[in-house]
Amino acid sequence: MDTISLLMQGFAVALSPESIMFAVVGAILGTLIGALPGLGPANGVAILIPLAFSLGLSPTSSLILLTSVYAGAMYGGRISSILLNIPGDEPAMMTCLDGYPMALKGKAAEALAISAIASFIGSFIATIGLVILAPILAKFALKFGPSEYFALFALAFATLGGITGKNQFKTLMAAAIGLMIATVGIDISTGVQRYTFNTLELFEGVDFIIAIVGLFAISELLFFLERHAGDGLKQVAINKLKLSAKDIIKVLPASIRGALLGFVSGVLPGAGASLGSFISYTLEKRTSDKGEFGHGDPRGVAAPEAGNNGAASGALVPMLTLGVPGSGTTAVLLAMLISLNISPGPMLFQQNADLVWGVIAAMFVGNLVLLLLNIPMVGIFVKLLSIPPKYLMPIVTLIASVGIYSVSHSALDLYFMVGFGVAGYIFRKVDIPLVPIILGMLLGPEMEKSLRHALVLSDGDWSVLFNSGLSIGLWTVAILGLVLPIVVGPIVRAKMARSKNSTR
Amino acid sequence: MRINDRVFGMLMLILAVAYGWEATQFPMPFGGHESVGPETFPIMLSIILGISSIYMMVRPDPDEKWAPAAMLVELAIVVLAMLAFAWAIEPIGFMPAAALVVSFLCWRMGASVSKSVMTGVISSVAIFFLFNHVLELALPLGLLEF
């Protein structure tokens, strides 16, 4: 068993005192960020990337830190869902359905504990799935040539809108904008300047870390200001925890089912965590509802949380093995890898086996830490929710700016960051999704390289892009990914809206 | 009303044309013309952007509500405050600049003046010490250098 021994080596990395420290710090920070209303895992990781980067951490340490932040934010998201009825991000929406009613019934502590356990089960099972599936997929991906890679990148964009995405053309537009930003700078293969306007600062292109922080964090501040400037959030009081083994056993099947469903939807391109938590919830409702769902049934809390966290780990599979992220947050993690000069993809498992397996092992450690943190210490995170956002948001913005400034000590980067923030605000107003923009900036150089590589090998014959079974398969899935949402999307969205409204 | 998408689509169409036109103007790389040059990929992108912006103009989605004018002015002021922070961080120094911008933002988000100033001062001093002494990332002292 090759995998087992590699995983054991990974644990050797993950159990070093330094790694454990980063996992704990990441888990705490992540939970804090996730617990804050309005800040999701993507923003959280985005804010911390420049910090990790300017601290000059080793690749393994930074990845352990940020994957723990990612996992922590997925855990933390449930706290604001349950206590405030405000999901931190879209996948956490389903947790509101039964979590908030449970809290209203005076069972907030139970809801928090059950959701923590379900989150743990979700992440744990999905991490095992990652251990099994990732090496297989990586081996398979070694067969990819440049034209297959080009098709794969196209597939990533085509499915990024996901089943629930609204307007496929807007996803496409966002991807094109991101790819266009990526072409700014000196062309690597010919040395030609492209779109630099002879500005020295643009020769190396636009730094995606700045774009990420601007698009996510700064635009979030503007939105926050617009939506609830000044208003205080009313929080449900927490009771004393009374949880018996029987209660846990009752939610166990729901959690395990949710974890498996979540993992699958995390791995599949385009499905993502929102769909993971949605499917887990609806399936659980269909199989075991006797009229209690939507009124504070613990299984209705466990299923979507397990699904949501399962999907989060599942999304790491295509990110690590193919270099194609399945969700916003994994796109941000990919940015981290690329800025550390590590190219994700099948070779990662051969060239950086220590790193990959160390990170995977650290995810097991991080989850255990998160479970321990989240049951006895949940009160500390809850305290944070009582700090009004009018104080928190400016401080978060400050931390984001300081991170950006520390990367290169240039005030110009801060201007760019604010510029991206304003652009992000406008994009969100016209419903242009932000993740494809980031992904375009990240994948642009590689995508162009594979296109040119493929065309040079074929002497400029464009049919090379479609002349292997594998690439035709990838193109087919890509086209399905574009077309399917137009057909299926409205149905799924209507269902999601209905299950949300029926519990209001 | 379906104005937003039409206006935005129009702007993006202009961008697509300008971007594509610029691509055709790239200097020929040394060694003569290749089948795929630095312009191939950008031209593809401009076509994709062009098509999707035309679609956006022809089939616009319903508008998301824009904030009332007063709020837009407010947002513009906040953006200006952040730009001012970017400008001030080096000449004035991190602590005063951060204290000012955080206080200002808190105040604009509805906190009382005294609490805003308190939040601004405490957070900027705390972050300065965290960054400079714990994380060892040098933030500029500016005016406080003496």
Image: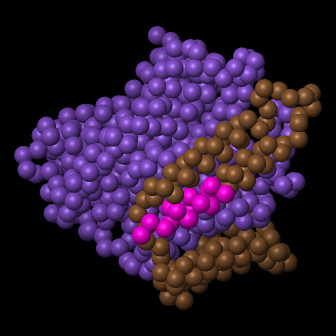
Q: Is the magenta stretch mostly helix, strand or loop?
A: helix
- The residue lying at 77 percent from left, 29 percent from top is B36
Query: In screen coordinates, is B95 left or right of A226?
Result: right
Mark yes or no: residue B46 visible. Answer: yes
What is the x, y in percent for residue A423?
61, 62
What colour scheme does the image use? by chain
Mark yes or no: residue A59 visible. Answer: no
- The residue lying at 49 percent from left, 84 percent from top is B111
- The residue lying at 48 percent from left, 41 percent from top is A160
Q: Where, quadrant-wise, is the C terminus of chain A in this rendering?
A: bottom left
Color of chain A here?
Answer: purple
Q: Nearer the viewer, residue B82 or B69?
A: B69
What is the x, y in percent for residue A391?
50, 75
Residue occupying the far top of the picture:
A1
Relative height, residue B45 to residue A319 (above, below):
below
What is the x, y in percent for residue A417?
67, 61
Q: Which of A492 and A58 is in front in this view?
A: A492
Residue occupying the far right of the picture:
B30
Specify the chain shown as brown: B
The residues colored magenta run: B1-14
Relative height, residue A293 to residue A190 (above, below):
below
Residue A266 placement: quadrant: top left
Residue occupying the far bottom of the picture:
B113
Q: Which of A390 and A148 is in front in this view?
A: A148
Q: Does the magenta stretch include residue A244?
A: no
What is the x, y in percent for residue A119?
33, 43
Query: In screen coordinates, is A210 left or right of A387?
Result: right
Query: In screen coordinates, is B131 left or right of B108?
Result: right
Relative height, residue A202 to residue B5 (above, below):
above
